[in-house]
Image (cartoon, rainbow, N blue to C red):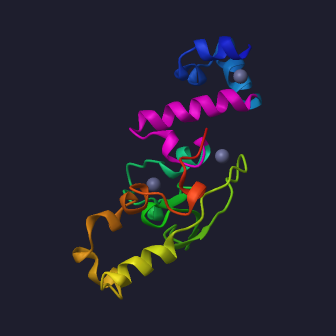
Protein backbone atom coordinates (compact mmCIF):
# COMPACT_ATOMS: atom_id res chain seq x y z
CA UNK A 1 0.00 0.00 0.00
CA UNK A 2 1.47 3.38 -0.98
CA UNK A 3 0.64 6.81 0.47
CA UNK A 4 -2.09 7.58 -2.06
CA UNK A 5 -3.82 4.28 -1.39
CA UNK A 6 -3.42 4.75 2.35
CA UNK A 7 -4.98 8.22 2.29
CA UNK A 8 -7.87 6.98 0.13
CA UNK A 9 -9.04 4.68 2.93
CA UNK A 10 -11.15 6.09 5.77
CA UNK A 11 -9.34 6.34 9.13
CA UNK A 12 -11.41 3.52 10.65
CA UNK A 13 -9.69 1.12 8.25
CA UNK A 14 -7.10 0.77 11.03
CA UNK A 15 -9.72 -0.98 13.14
CA UNK A 16 -10.53 -3.59 10.49
CA UNK A 17 -9.49 -7.20 11.02
CA UNK A 18 -8.74 -8.06 7.40
CA UNK A 19 -5.95 -7.79 4.82
CA UNK A 20 -6.70 -4.14 4.07
CA UNK A 21 -6.68 -3.33 7.78
CA UNK A 22 -3.31 -5.07 8.11
CA UNK A 23 -1.88 -3.22 5.11
CA UNK A 24 -3.23 0.10 6.39
CA UNK A 25 -1.70 -0.39 9.85
CA UNK A 26 1.61 -1.51 8.34
CA UNK A 27 1.79 1.65 6.24
CA UNK A 28 0.86 3.82 9.22
CA UNK A 29 3.66 2.26 11.28
CA UNK A 30 6.23 2.77 8.53
CA UNK A 31 5.31 6.16 7.01
CA UNK A 32 5.85 9.27 9.09
CA UNK A 33 4.09 11.53 6.58
CA UNK A 34 0.90 9.49 6.71
CA UNK A 35 1.09 9.15 10.49
CA UNK A 36 1.32 12.95 10.76
CA UNK A 37 -1.66 13.25 8.43
CA UNK A 38 -3.74 10.92 10.63
CA UNK A 39 -2.71 12.76 13.80
CA UNK A 40 -3.69 16.12 12.26
CA UNK A 41 -7.10 14.70 11.38
CA UNK A 42 -7.62 13.52 14.96
CA UNK A 43 -6.71 16.97 16.27
CA UNK A 44 -9.26 18.57 13.92
CA UNK A 45 -11.89 16.04 15.04
CA UNK A 46 -11.28 17.37 18.56
CA UNK A 47 -12.16 20.84 17.30
CA UNK A 48 -8.59 22.12 17.50
CA UNK A 49 -6.30 23.53 14.82
CA UNK A 50 -2.92 21.74 14.53
CA UNK A 51 -1.41 24.98 13.19
CA UNK A 52 -1.73 26.51 16.66
CA UNK A 53 0.90 24.10 18.04
CA UNK A 54 4.66 23.72 17.47
CA UNK A 55 4.01 20.49 15.51
CA UNK A 56 1.29 17.94 14.90
CA UNK A 57 2.65 15.56 17.57
CA UNK A 58 2.42 18.10 20.36
CA UNK A 59 -0.98 19.10 18.99
CA UNK A 60 -2.16 15.50 19.14
CA UNK A 61 -0.77 14.64 22.57
CA UNK A 62 -1.61 17.97 24.22
CA UNK A 63 -5.25 17.79 23.07
CA UNK A 64 -5.77 14.29 24.49
CA UNK A 65 -9.37 13.95 25.60
CA UNK A 66 -10.56 11.56 28.30
CA UNK A 67 -14.07 10.84 29.52
CA UNK A 68 -12.82 10.39 33.09
CA UNK A 69 -10.45 13.33 33.51
CA UNK A 70 -11.33 16.85 32.37
CA UNK A 71 -7.85 18.04 33.40
CA UNK A 72 -4.95 16.37 31.52
CA UNK A 73 -2.81 16.89 34.65
CA UNK A 74 -5.06 14.30 36.32
CA UNK A 75 -5.19 11.84 33.43
CA UNK A 76 -2.50 9.13 33.41
CA UNK A 77 -3.02 8.72 29.66
CA UNK A 78 -2.01 12.31 28.88
CA UNK A 79 1.60 12.22 27.67
CA UNK A 80 2.06 15.94 27.13
CA UNK A 81 0.42 18.85 28.90
CA UNK A 82 0.42 22.49 27.91
CA UNK A 83 -0.03 25.77 29.76
CA UNK A 84 -1.23 28.18 27.07
CA UNK A 85 -0.83 31.28 29.25
CA UNK A 86 2.89 30.52 29.69
CA UNK A 87 3.36 29.18 26.13
CA UNK A 88 4.75 26.01 27.71
CA UNK A 89 4.55 22.36 26.72
CA UNK A 90 5.76 19.75 29.18
CA UNK A 91 5.95 16.16 30.34
CA UNK A 92 3.83 15.70 33.46
CA UNK A 93 5.43 14.33 36.64
CA UNK A 94 2.79 12.03 38.12
CA UNK A 95 2.36 10.66 41.62
CA UNK A 96 1.24 7.11 42.43
CA UNK A 97 -2.37 8.10 41.72
CA UNK A 98 -1.41 9.37 38.28
CA UNK A 99 -2.00 13.01 39.19
CA UNK A 100 0.60 15.58 38.19
CA UNK A 101 1.23 18.71 40.26
CA UNK A 102 3.93 19.87 37.86
CA UNK A 103 5.64 19.11 34.56
CA UNK A 104 9.06 19.31 32.94
CA UNK A 105 9.10 21.97 30.23
CA UNK A 106 10.26 20.61 26.87
CA UNK A 107 12.21 22.64 24.30
CA UNK A 108 11.81 20.17 21.43
CA UNK A 109 9.10 17.77 20.36
CA UNK A 110 10.03 14.25 21.58
CA UNK A 111 8.75 12.76 18.29
CA UNK A 112 10.08 15.06 15.56
CA UNK A 113 12.46 17.44 17.36
CA UNK A 114 10.58 20.53 16.20
CA UNK A 115 11.60 23.49 18.36
CA UNK A 116 9.06 24.57 20.96
CA UNK A 117 8.83 28.38 21.38
CA UNK A 118 10.49 29.64 24.54
CA UNK A 119 8.44 29.89 27.70
CA UNK A 120 6.81 33.25 28.48
CA UNK A 121 6.31 32.43 32.16
CA UNK A 122 8.64 35.21 33.33
CA UNK A 123 6.97 37.75 31.02
CA UNK A 124 3.56 36.66 32.31
CA UNK A 125 4.61 37.33 35.91
CA UNK A 126 6.43 40.57 35.04
CA UNK A 127 3.50 42.07 33.16
CA UNK A 128 0.99 41.11 35.80
CA UNK A 129 3.24 42.54 38.52
CA UNK A 130 3.30 45.80 36.56
CA UNK A 131 -0.50 45.69 36.60
CA UNK A 132 -0.41 45.32 40.38
CA UNK A 133 -0.76 41.54 40.65
CA UNK A 134 2.20 40.46 42.78
CA UNK A 135 0.63 37.06 43.44
CA UNK A 136 -1.45 36.32 40.32
CA UNK A 137 -2.62 32.86 41.40
CA UNK A 138 -4.10 34.29 44.60
CA UNK A 139 -5.94 36.94 42.58
CA UNK A 140 -6.95 34.67 39.70
CA UNK A 141 -10.57 35.86 39.49
CA UNK A 142 -9.44 39.49 39.19
CA UNK A 143 -6.84 38.97 36.44
CA UNK A 144 -7.49 40.45 32.98
CA UNK A 145 -9.08 37.64 30.95
CA UNK A 146 -6.32 37.70 28.33
CA UNK A 147 -3.75 36.57 30.93
CA UNK A 148 -5.74 33.45 31.80
CA UNK A 149 -5.21 32.05 28.31
CA UNK A 150 -2.75 32.42 25.43
CA UNK A 151 -4.61 35.56 24.27
CA UNK A 152 -2.16 38.01 25.91
CA UNK A 153 0.83 36.80 23.86
CA UNK A 154 -0.99 35.70 20.69
CA UNK A 155 -2.45 39.19 20.29
CA UNK A 156 1.00 40.66 19.65
CA UNK A 157 4.48 39.78 18.60
CA UNK A 158 6.66 38.63 21.47
CA UNK A 159 10.38 37.94 21.07
CA UNK A 160 10.34 38.45 17.29
CA UNK A 161 10.41 35.32 15.21
CA UNK A 162 9.88 33.23 18.32
CA UNK A 163 6.23 34.19 18.34
CA UNK A 164 5.61 33.27 14.72
CA UNK A 165 3.08 30.53 14.20
CA UNK A 166 5.12 27.32 13.91
CA UNK A 167 4.92 25.51 10.60
CA UNK A 168 3.71 21.93 10.01
ZN1 LIG B 1 2.52 7.24 3.54
ZN1 LIG C 1 -8.05 9.95 31.75
ZN1 LIG D 1 6.62 16.78 16.64
The N terminus sits in image quarter: top right
Find out whether residue 52 is within the magenta segment: yes
**Residue 80 rendering spot, x and y as whole percentages:** 56, 57
Q: Is residue 137 above or below residue 153?
A: below
Find out whether residue 157 is within the magenta segment: no
Q: Is residue 49 left or right of residue 141?
A: right
Q: Which segment is the magenta one?
A: 31-56
Q: Is residue 32 left or right of residue 60?
A: right
Kindly identify the residue that appears in the image at 72 percent across and 32 percent down.
32
**Residue 59 rendering spot, x and y as whole percentages:** 53, 46
Kindly identify the residue that appears in the image at 45 percent across and 34 percent down.
44
Q: Front-most of 11 and 165? A: 165
The outermost residue toward the bottom is 134
The C terminus sits in image quarter: top right
Q: Is residue 130 above or below residue 121?
A: below
Kindly identify the residue that appears in the image at 35 percent across and 87 percent down.
135
Q: Is residue 118 left or right of residue 138?
A: right
Amino acid sequence: MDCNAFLAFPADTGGRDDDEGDAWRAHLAACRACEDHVLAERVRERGRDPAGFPCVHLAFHATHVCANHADPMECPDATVVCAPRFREWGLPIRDAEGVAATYVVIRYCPWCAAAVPSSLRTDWHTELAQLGFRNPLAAWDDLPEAYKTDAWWRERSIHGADAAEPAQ
